[in-house]
Image: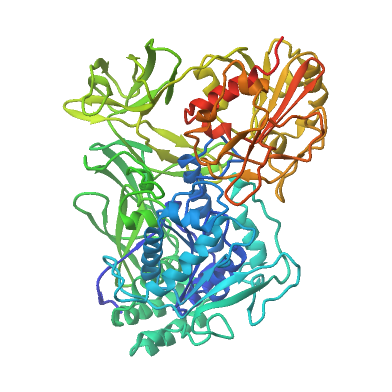
């Protein structure tokens, strides 16, 4: 038992604290070692997955289970903060990973970009490019090698999202192509899953699909002490940005799985050998040893199982190469470490390091059981290993301080899908990184050990840890930065004349002694540079660049030049309690747009909603915007403001909005303009009966085609003519959509000056309704100004200015 057999095995753990497993969890993991097989669940967005089914597959059937979300959800809305677009995609990616840490499944993606709600599967696939997204899905299938594939949605759309239907069609096509040797993808081999099914559902309670496989996704698990429906509720509740907190299901939860292609089966895994027999000769010994280890496990003495597990490790290493070997060796090695009571961790002295700089790492190993002899042979962080040859003593930590070098080739930390230049419907970059949920750790520590004579290497990500006074110990990934980071005072400069404007840019040193010049690039030239000099890390300098507008919209890159190298990235951190802190390093680009804009009234009060950048966009064109607290709305005079704007989803997230109704209506009646942006009304949220002076309802109507024709139903209406005379040109260049959650069934006193519709639909007038009340004006609009204004769409500014000036004092 003391001979070192086979090649040392590396086991890697995803970013987070070192795993610490109870005996019940060890028993679960031991049983899983004998299960060889997999399942892949496919849908379109974060939060589309059936977490009950994932939890039961991963924990009850114990197959390797993964969720493939074709997009990262960046086209949706955000209930918990102001992030939209790519930043929201970062949040929703991490929410998926948080969910998977609870339900036990894994997470994958494709390169498809979420471009918002789509009513058409054809529009969706045309935007994504069917071949590209199918290619990504085939890669996932070939790398994961699932036995069964489960599509969340049906092949025909019905009344669901176009992305949803597209995900089902992509899954079915990829199921076939993944098995086709003629369909070549670099570094992959064909894989034939046994079957693909649809996780059917019906709006009619109790309705059944003929011939469907039945599956209880909420069985009780005595090792977990809860049902999979209860576990799944915890998992689903991680989708906090979408307001998807879920109630647990304590009893049975029937699922229906409808056959789509492959070999039909009466059960999901019929005809599939989920044991080690499927890999061929030699598996009998391994199977017997794994069974013996399960039988031997004692809750109070898990270390007693280590000798048998080490024999199982020998047997597993001796198996011929097969699709399951590496993953199962990783699982087995971690179980051995858990049974031996090992604590292994690597932490850094700081969370931020400059590319090419050094990082002090504390590597620690602690043996918490004397039952099994463990020796620490070496620790490798970067460079040569630190040789130790130290026997571990129970309760005595072996701690090493190592200075690690970060190669200068390591770029500033960024989600891998945001590093390249995106294409029309997809993100760009290395395919394997695009399908992965996140980038690998910046730096890892390899702990070479012997456990009762067997060589094992435990790999841990180097993380920064600190103690939060309320949350306790927390962890965050290490971030890499450039020598300087750049932040512009705005990402959008709007010009209503040829006069130049100041652009204030802050340059921050991330290391000592940074000196260079700052440029506003006009490709292919950099333009004249302004000098900066920063002595110490953390020092900042404000540089003022004078910007002259082009006749049309343009985008310019800001570049800091230091010793011949150029740096053009900001550094932003996304912080929420339910996910690890995320670092994003976007390019510092300034959009310039010149157009005619008459603002009329300028004093604006803004009531925040779920989070948007409308207030800052209005300031950018010269409005005086005051953010109003609840107390100011409820008890302070509002007469100082020409108009009051209510942020998106305010009535969904602020319960006091109903209390403000009398004050807001008095403000309107006395001569003010109240502009309420969209609120949602669906199964997740509702709106009060009274928002305006006269009744109207909020529907789920929307127009998803941002190029849809806009008809001026009331061409002489004030909001279409003054102070800016609008034309069809003002609705060109809109992004992602026209609008959402339009009004419906309104009182006759409301006027609807515009109509629009998606292909094949009738005109929808509820995008904008306006009513006079007393001396003032009330407006409700579902037009997506929260996307258009930050994007610098000229016509959206001109229309919004007219709405703000719809009435005045």
| Residue 197 shown left or right of residue 10 in the figure | right
Q: Position of residue 794 (x, y in %)?
A: 49, 25
Percent position (x, y) of residue 555? 35, 28
Name the foreground residue: 314 vs 572. 572
Residue at (33%, 82%) from the top-left corner?
315
Q: Residue furthest left?
A: 564
Which quarter of the rendered picture does the C terminus lie within?
A: top right
On the image, the x and y values in percent for residue 289 come to 42, 84
Please state if 492 lies on the left or on the right of 486 as rendered.
right
Frontmost residue, 647 versus 254: 647
Left or right of 497 in this view: 559: left
User: From what the image shows, is residue 628 above or below residue 302?
Assistant: above
Q: Position of residue 204 (x, y in %)?
A: 75, 67
* Image quadrant where one finds the N terminus: bottom left
Q: Nearer the viewer, residue 688 or 278?
A: 688
Quarter of the rendering containing residue 351: top left
Q: How many marks?
A: 0
- Indicate how the structure is coloured in the image: rainbow
Residue found at x 73% / y 14% = 638
Task: In the rendered view, tell whether residue 413 sits above or below residue 456.
Answer: above
The answer to whether residue 365 of the structure is visible from this angle is no
Asked if one can make out residue 376 in the rendered structure from this viewpoint, the answer is yes
Q: Residue at x 53, y 38 (%)?
A: 468
Determine whether 526 is above or below 310 in the image. above
């Amino acid at each position: 038992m003391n001979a070192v057999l086979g090649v040392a095995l590396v086991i890697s753990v995803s970013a987070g604290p070192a795993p610490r497993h109870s005996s019940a969890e060890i028993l679960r993991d031991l049983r899983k070692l004998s299960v060889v097989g997999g399942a892949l669940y496919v849908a379109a967005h974060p939060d589309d997955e059936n977490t009950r089914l994932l939890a039961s597959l991963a924990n009850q059937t114990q197959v390797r289970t993964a969720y493939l979300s074709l997009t990262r959800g960046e086209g949706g809305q955000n209930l918990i903060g102001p992030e939209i677009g790519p930043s929201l995609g970062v949040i929703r990616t991490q929410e998926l990973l948080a969910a998977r840490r609870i339900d036990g499944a894994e997470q994958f993606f494709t390169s498809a970009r979420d471009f918002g709600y789509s009513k058409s599967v054809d529009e969706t696939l045309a935007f994504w490019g069917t071949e590209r997204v199918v290619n990504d899905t085939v890669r996932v299938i070939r790398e994961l090698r699932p036995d069964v594939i489960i599509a969340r949605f049906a092949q025909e759309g019905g009344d669901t999202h176009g992305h949803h239907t597209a995900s089902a069609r992509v899954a079915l096509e990829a199921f076939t192509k993944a098995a086709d040797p003629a369909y070549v993808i670099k570094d992959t081999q064909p894989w034939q899953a046994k079957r693909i099914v649809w996780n059917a559902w019906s709006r009619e309670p109790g309705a059944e699909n003929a011939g469907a496989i039945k599956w209880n996704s909420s069985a009780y698990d005595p090792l977990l002490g809860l049902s999979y429906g209860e576990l799944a509720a915890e998992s689903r509740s991680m989708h906090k940005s979408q307001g998807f907190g879920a109630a647990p299901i304590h009893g049975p939860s029937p699922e229906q799985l409808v056959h789509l292609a492959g070999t039909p089966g009466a059960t999901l895994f019929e005809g599939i050998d989920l044991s080690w027999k499927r890999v061929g000769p030699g598996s009998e010994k391994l199977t017997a040893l794994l069974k013996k280890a399960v039988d031997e496990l004692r809750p109070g003495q898990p270390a007693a199982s280590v000798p048998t597990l080490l024999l199982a490790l020998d047997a597993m290493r001796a198996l011929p190469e097969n699709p399951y070997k590496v993953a199962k060796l990783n699982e087995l090695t971690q179980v051995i470490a858990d049974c031996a009571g090992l604590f292994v961790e690597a932490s850094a002295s700081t969370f931020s390091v400059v590319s090419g700089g050094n990082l002090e790492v504390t590597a620690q190993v602690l043996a918490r059981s004397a039952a099994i002899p463990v020796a620490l042979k070496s620790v490798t962080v970067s460079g040569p290993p630190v040789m130790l040859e130290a026997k571990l003593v129970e309760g005595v930590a072996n701690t090493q301080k190592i200075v690690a070098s970060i190669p200068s080739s390591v770029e500033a930390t960024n989600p891998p899908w945001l590093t390249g230049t995106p294409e029309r419907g997809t993100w760009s970059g290395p395919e394997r990184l695009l399908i992965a949920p996140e980038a690998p750790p910046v730096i890892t520590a390899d702990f070479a050990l012997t456990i009762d004579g067997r060589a094992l290497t435990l790999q841990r990500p180097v993380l920064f840890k600190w103690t939060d006074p309320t949350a306790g110990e927390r962890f965050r990934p290490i971030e890499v930065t450039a020598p300087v980071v750049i932040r512009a005072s705005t990402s959008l400069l709007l010009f209503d004349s040829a006069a130049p404007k100041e652009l204030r840019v802050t340059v921050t040193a991330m290391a000592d002694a940074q000196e260079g010049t700052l440029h506003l690039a006009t490709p292919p030239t950099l333009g004249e540079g302004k000098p900066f000099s920063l002595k110490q890390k953390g020092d900042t300098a404000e540089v003022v660049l004078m910007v002259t507008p082009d006749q049309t919209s343009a985008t310019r890159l800001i570049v800091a030049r230091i010793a011949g190298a150029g740096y053009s990235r900001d550094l932003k951190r996304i912080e929420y309690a339910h996910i690890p802190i995320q670092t994003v390093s976007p390019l510092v680009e300034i959009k310039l747009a010149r157009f005619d804009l008459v603002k009329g009234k300028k004093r604006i009060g803004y009531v925040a909603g779920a989070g948007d950048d409308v207030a800052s966009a209005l300031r950018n064109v010269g409005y005086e915007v005051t953010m109003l607290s609840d107390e100011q709305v409820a008890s302070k005079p509002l007469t100082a403001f020409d108009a009051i704007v209510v942020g998106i989803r305010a009535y969904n997230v602020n319960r006091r909005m109903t209390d403000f109704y009398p004050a807001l209506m008095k403000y309107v009646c006395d001569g003010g303009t109240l502009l309420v942006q969209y609120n949602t009304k669906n199964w997740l949220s509702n709106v009060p009966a009274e928002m305006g002076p006269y009744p109207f309802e909020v529907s789920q109507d929307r127009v998803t085609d941002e190029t849809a024709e806009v008809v001026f139903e009331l061409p002489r209406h004030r909001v279409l003519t003054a102070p800016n005379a609008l034309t069809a040109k003002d609705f060109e260049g809109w992004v992602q959509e026209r609008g959402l959650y339009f009004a419906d069934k309104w009182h006759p006193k409301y006027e609807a000056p515009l109509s629009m519709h998606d292909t094949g639909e009738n005109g929808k007038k509820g995008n904008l309704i306006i009513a006079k009340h007393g001396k003032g004006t009330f407006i409700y609009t579902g037009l997506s100004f929260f996307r258009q204004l930050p994007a610098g769409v000229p016509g959206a500014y001109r229309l919004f200015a007219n709405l703000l000036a719809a009435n005045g004092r």
